[in-house]
Amino acid sequence: MQPRDYRLTGPEGAHAQQRGLADARWYQSPVNKAAMRALLVRRNWPALRDTCIWFALLGASGYAMYATWGTAWFPLPFLVYAVLYASVSDSRWHECSHGTAFKSDWLNILVYEISSFLVFRESTTWRWSHVRHHTDTIIVGRDPEIASPRPVSLWQMVLSFFKPQAMWAEAKRIVLHAFGGRDSQAATYVPESEWPKIHWKARIYLLIYCSVIALAVAGQSLLPLMYVGMPTVFGSWLISIYGYTQHAGLAEDVTDHRRNSRTVYMNFLNRFLYWNMNYHVEHHMYPLVPYHALPKLHALIKDDCPPAYPGLWAAWKEIITAWRRQAKDPAFYIERPLPNSDATYERATASVKAADAQGFVDISEARTLAPEDVMRVDVGGHTFAVYRTANGELAATEGICTHGNAHLANGLVLGDEIECPKHNGRFNVHDGSARRAPACVALERYAIESRAEGLFLNTRPLPRTDAIKRWALRVVAVKNLSTFIREIELAPEQLTPQFTYKPGDYLRLCIPAYEARSLYLAVPTVSQAATWEALGLTHAKACNVQPCMRNYSLATNPVKDETLKLNVRLAFNGADEQTMHLGVGSAYMYSLKPGDVVEAMGPQGDFRIKPANTDMVYLGGGAGMAPLKSHLSFLLETEKTARSISFWYGARNRHEALYREYFENLAKQHQNFTFNLVLSEPQDEEDKQLNIGFVHQAMYDQFLKGAANSRAFEYYLCGPPPMMAAARTMLKKHGVPDKQVAFDEF
């Protein structure tokens, strides 16, 4: 078995998406709703008590260090201080990042920022890293926090107890961010809006460390470094003793936390230092549950989980055995025994309804909702969440969180806000606005009417409080652009308001729940039909048990084109898999026929043309064509720009190249535009007459290498993650500032 590529910018990420592992639905052990509500109660006292004890121990050991400085007794208080500083801070960092340790948000934020500095993690970057970890836990190519990659290097595992590689990597990243750069791995999961915050926090970290070093030099004493800096080196070993028990040696690429996480029984002292993170299966299943309630959650679900390990040594014996095997056999992992269970994925029981002609459904059972409670309602393939706030008011929103694939009826109502059960983002239930990251897009809202005969939910959305609107779009035409990429042409059903958007924007398509849906082949080429038949796609059926949203960029010119066009790539697992799995979003889109009507929200986006006169370079591949085509059509056919534009597009062969004739004609009509097609897998002699290789390398060899100043251009990139990562690395090596590189990664 070849070693896997654990980078987020490598090919494994795309493979995970094809297999349906990215932002997937995960198994949850069933928990009675009343019992879960009791577990979710937030309190300040437990975390305040534990934090005061922690700070007191830090202060006492720090004072003892000062008192014993220069004596043989100094190492004793220093080692205690170092562990409290660098290891115990890890669990505080973790729990406060979820916002569950304290009831008061400001306390969670304060302790999180302090802990982040102590554990040597830039707080904003790592907050988003941990969001991704909970989205795609131990999914190779998606999870940035896989601590035990295969094949295992036993020597590196031993070194990792002192974190030299991790600290060096974080130090380089902090310096890079402090000077305005962007780490390529972090750029795959950190939103654009967060980078200014990351830059100034990195500068604060750097300023503190430089000040401590300056103080040590000025005082000609190492003592300042013993308080800040050196504790990270000598005190991180306990993180490894605790942390590796979470996932090391267990299964990768599964969607069941019982198979990739451990629960380990620990004594009172270890649970205090680790803040009950030894209940790690429970934490991943239900991240909304505060750390102090995890033992009770364990008692409720333990019969549906593999047996807990009796102690740290029992877990470590298994880990060491697994590491030794994985050093020689990367395919080996420990398969945890699962009990027989009838549990389902969804904790929130859906109330399935049928709407009347006006779109109303009877939800009279919502009258029984207690304050700060929520229920789920499903209507015609769509799903809703109905809330009762702390003051007794009823409200309703769309059911699925706009950030992740999680139903809000499984979340926690706090006052007039709903907290997502997956990433702890929050929304106001009255106006739908996003109130806490990672949530950033508002929810759709729905009216509730009280009548003599009961309560009724209007399934037609209320006007939004932002510029985003919901649209009914009729399928005008379906066209196969390549073997697995399709153009879907849409037209708004309503004439007013007019659908307006900017080049580079995208739509959020509403994917309803559906059963046994077949793919529509449209008008295939002979080779495409044969390929689909060979792969089993012609007769494949897809199903989707939970409504969700999928983003698709617009490939059209907002001024010239009267309809909207999307480029949709069919996602499915590879031919080496025993069972065919189709992506729920792309399979739905591939089932559409002319005349069908879909619902979408938008337009949205920040991949926009920058207002400048700088010459431009576009680089794309695959379905990344859509926003690039929108840009280029607008620039050349609408604005008639005089800016020099070079477009480099990568495909496997010329038959897989999207809109080839269109761009070749555009190049003939505009002297300031060049189109460069690069083929990675040429099929015949005609293919071999074109540029061969990787598109980013061809752009370098034939364009950038001979350019007088590579910084004189603006760069726009859109395509598969490996291509994007390679291109951005290449541009960085040539000194192109991040502000001159715009990208839209999918």
Image (cartoon, helix red, strand yellow):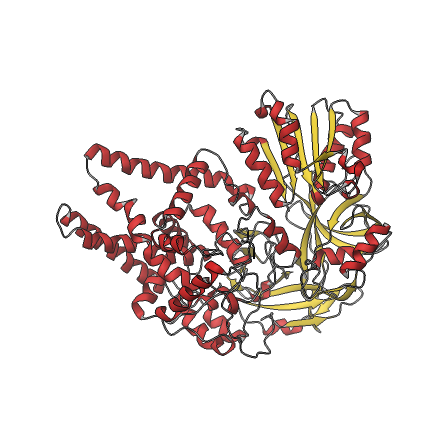
Residue 334: horizontal and vertical position, in percent? 49, 68
**x 30%, y 44%: residue:** 229
**x 79%, y 57%: residue:** 532
Residue 647: horizontal and vertical position, in percent? 70, 31
**Between 568 and 388, the one nearer to me in the picture:** 568
**Between 483 and 78, the one nearer to me in the picture:** 483
470 on left or right of 279: right
Visible in this render: residue 524?
Answer: no
Residue 132: horizontal and vertical position, in percent? 53, 54
440 on left or right of 162: right
292 on left or right of 227: right
Pick out the residue farthest to the top: 708
Visible in this render: residue 679?
Answer: yes
**Between 3 and 614, the one nearer to me in the picture:** 3
Residue 623: horizontal and vertical position, in percent? 71, 45
Give above or below for 152 relative to 210: below
Quarter of the image with the N terminus in it: bottom right
**Between 592 and 523, the one nearer to me in the picture:** 523
